[in-house]
Image: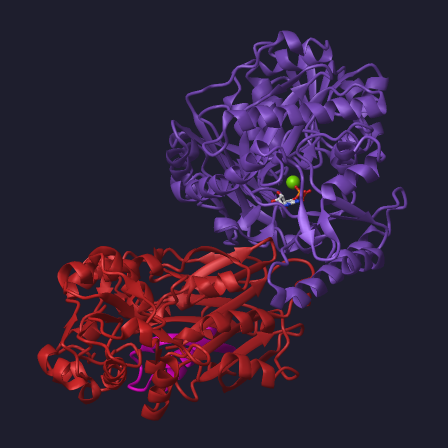
Chain colours: A purple, B red
Amino acid sequence: MRIMGIGGGAREHAIAWKLGLSDHKPEIFWIAENRNPGIHKICRDNQGELRTGRTTDAKTIVRSARGWGIDMVVVGPEEPGFHGIPDALEKEGIHCIGATQELSVIERSKADLRRLQWENNLPGKLLFRTFKNAREASDYIRKNIESQPWLQNIVIKPARQSGGKGVKLIEDRQVYLHDEKERFKEAYFDSLQASMAAYSDIEDKILVEEKAWGPEYSLQCFTDGKTVLGTPLVQDNKSAHEFDSGPETGGMGSISGPDMTLPFITREEYDKSLKIVEGIVESIQKKTGKSYHGMVGGQMMLTENEGPTVIEMYSRLGDPEALNMLAMLKTDIIDIFQAIVERQLSKLKLEFTSEDAVVVKVVAPNGYPEKRDKAKGHPVQVLETNIKRNGCYLFWGNADLHEDGQVITGGSRLLALMGTDHTLPPASARIEKTMSSVQLADGWGLYHRSDIGSQQLLAKRQDVAERVRPLYTYREEHGILGSRMGWVPRVGRIDPSHLMLQETHGPEKA
Amino acid sequence: MPGLIGFYTFGEGRENWDASQFIHYGLSALQGRGQESISLATIGPGNTLHTLGGKGGVEEFFQKNKTTLPKGFIGIGQTSSYEDDYLVHVKTPYELALALDGKTDLHENRGEATKLFARQLSQLLHSEKEPLKATSMLINKIGGGYSFVALTHKQELIAGRNPLGVKPLETGSVGFDIAAVASETCALDVMGIDHTGPVETGEVIIHTPEDIRGNTPANSPSSFCSYEYVYLARLDSNVHTLPIAKIRNSIGKEMAKAHPVKADVVIGVPETALPIANGYSQESGIPEEFGFMRTGENIRAALKPTQKERLLGVQLKLNPIKSAIKGKDIVLVDDSVVRGNTLQNTVFNLKRNGAQRIHVRIGSPALVSPCPYGVEIPPRDELVSGNLNEKELANTVGADSISFMTIEELQHAIGLPRQNLCMRCFEKGAGTQ
Ligand SMILES: Nc1ncnc2c1ncn2[C@@H]1O[C@H](COP(=O)(O)OP(=O)(O)O)[C@@H](O)[C@H]1O
Ligand SMILES: [Mg+2]
């Protein structure tokens, strides 16, 4: 059997690793934008090869797949899906594990995802508004901030995935700092408008949604369109620096286990989260009339108004969350992929280890994420035997293997180290012990988050969970889960969630 | 005693933040540490460092300078209980502004000592390639007890606490855009920033446009200022992970156990002693009453520089509520006695309004020595407890009994090992370096 993977990050390295462990003994081929040293080696050891090329270019991908005589393709990142790579492959009769273009809209457009949730009145949604331009956003907020108090605490996002534009979280809870916050919001609207101008395919450019708070976690799933199988919860850490400070990154490391849930999420919350993901898969299939087969994930948060809530959807596995999940997975990955292809997932039972907790820590060059040009181009030195001796695993990320054997940083997250143990803190400590095995030969600095998996950070997560859980269970008990009632003098009792349902749904159903 | 703020921003659009407004409200929350002199420094686009300083209080300063406040998206601020005590601006060789709480041992005079420290930091940052290493070297070399924040022309915000760790410093962050440091967690709360933990003793944290980096502090014995726990820090703060409110309550309970007395009511001297009185009442079972009403804003009389201002503070602060006092035996709880005048004033006031017996209970040991780290405890010849014993003091102020906490009791109430608490102001024969 010949398998081809797409993508060159740590997530793809981990997928390749599991493919290499499969009893089906597949020959492994790969296309990535960088020569990922880990994937390169796995391909070579399994009678295949890694070729560099544009992973969003259907022609290149299809040509390679045909040239290599590939039976099945697995897509790692989201971009190939957004560009219709799975569609192109399937048109050629090549099986593909990965959401097709139309279905991957649940990730590509955060605005469309919210609309889908409200149109179908699914649980776990957030209030939102979209705007065509900065002016419209500013005016709307200024005009309605008193009658719709949720507009004070908002998250501003590009309405569709757009080159590196991040999200801004703005809580405007101190009236004495209101002017500062307002100015910042409006300036960011302007800058979003400027960078979104290039996209003429959508009208709405700016998404504003309710700012929630609570512990975050990802639920990654496999689906064949009929069945959605959940995997262990993983928590990623988005802030660049210790204790959740600093700029947003793609993820600095993640924790999972030793069970299907996390120490601060209940089994019941897991089940509700899975239902939410199922609901979204079902709704998008209904809307597009297409079958979703591949990976899907909910990046979730436990929130006061809704309980388990979707922050965004993944049309793929998370990076780095995939590493945790795959490390815990006992079922042969090719059995899963085959069941997806044959739409037989309901017959498969996924098995995961219940003995090990898994910690993943990402290592990035100084400069990431804000000054990537500075983070790029440094030679990497890794003592792999040292890492193994400490019982840890290395997954290469944004790294490039040159002809002379030297690995060079690409400017983004360089690699991830993974450690396992019976509980999270010792797994974290294991990685810390071997951290010095990774260095840059030219003396440029690397950083990682030592707090991930530590008892201290776990306690902090637990604390947040324990503050938010009683709030949403109170709502559940009072039959008002999902409502956002408030009293506005002279306006009376308001419920913005009810208004939103009417708008997206028509008044009769709301 | 100064209160410090450091405010830092990241990410796209950071130039749209106005640091001065965050510093304004952060300093407001720290004015319990004194507000005679206010100063701030910010950096805006173009990397020019602007500073401004002037007479307090915090609100007056920011009102008066509304239009001339230095604009910038990162900055530091200081509110100080000393007159003419501003952050230091060093222009060469490495331009920086520095605000310091506590005192380095580079000079007798706190202000001079701070200037010398800032100059040495500037030198080191200039000659050393690695700012983190340079700053940790400095705090390990220069003695005293201090915390500081510094802002450099390269958009670095440096926060540090010397290994002794006498003075507090806490960190916080919110969203992906803002990080901050402050002397007390209450200032982070007021700025709408989540507390992330203390700056460890001997730790240096540097914020740059690219990252936040910290050294790994050496495991040296630390010595936290016990006066912070008793009096200086605000009730809604945590100082080095310990919640102040809980400690003040324990102090009251500890006092009730160790220094019991028969009485009708417990009355605390506003504001700082109220939670201590509360603890005393809970433990002793004697009901607590509001004994005084305050006129005007909350001022810390003991921190005022002149005797007249101190008395003015007390008199405005403490109008007795007659019905709570008349004919009663009273446990009067205060947090500390410095010169004794305000206590005398208070006791006299209560008796004149019909109080029967007054038993004074002080929620800290007698202050007998000045502070080597710059807390404004006056010279020994001004300290009433340095010169009179409890009985003499009771007679002088007109109380029926007076007792102070012992050092051991205070240590027990705070709950830290003795060697990790600085109690030099409570120890005779100490107080010089
Ligand atoms: N509505 C929200 N409320 C609170 N936090 C949010 C919200 N939306 C996003 N975030 C925070 O911002 C991070 C990034 O947002 P996300 O929508 O996942 O965008 P990205 O495409 O950058 O991953 C999330 O992981 C979460 O921490
Ligand atoms: Mg995300």
Asked if residue B226 lies in the magenta stretch, the reply is no
Q: Which image quarter has ligand 2?
A: top right
Q: In this view, does A486 lie to the left or right of A321?
A: right
On the image, the x and y values in percent for residue B189 come to: 50, 61
Q: Give the range drawn in magenta.
A: B96-125
> Looking at the image, which residue is at 63% across and 14% down?
A336
Task: Tell me, yes or no, if residue B95 can be seen here.
Answer: no
Can you tell which quarter of the image residue B267 is in? bottom left
> Looking at the image, which residue is at 60% across and 53% down?
B176
Asked if residue B98 lies in the magenta stretch, the reply is yes
How many numbered markers are drawn? 0
> Foreground residue, A154 or B219?
A154
Toward the right, the furthest residue is: A200
Task: Tell me, yes or no, if residue A244 can be seen here.
Answer: yes
Q: Is residue A229 above or below residue B249?
A: above
Q: Is residue A65 above or below residue A206?
A: above
Q: In which quarter of the image is the C terminus of chain B?
A: bottom left
On the image, the x and y values in percent for residue B21 come to: 60, 72
Q: In this view, does A450 lie to the left or right of A494?
A: left
Q: Is residue A89 left or right of residue B416?
A: right
On the image, the x and y values in percent for residue A260 come to: 50, 23
> Foreground residue, B340 or A328?
B340
Q: Quadrant of the N terminus of chain B?
A: bottom left
Can you tell which quarter of the image residue A509 is in? top right
> Foreground residue, A112 or B213?
A112
On the image, the x and y values in percent for residue A448 come to: 50, 46
Toward the top, the furthest residue is: A347
> Foreground residue, B414 or A99?
B414
Q: In this view, does B409 lie above or below A450?
A: below
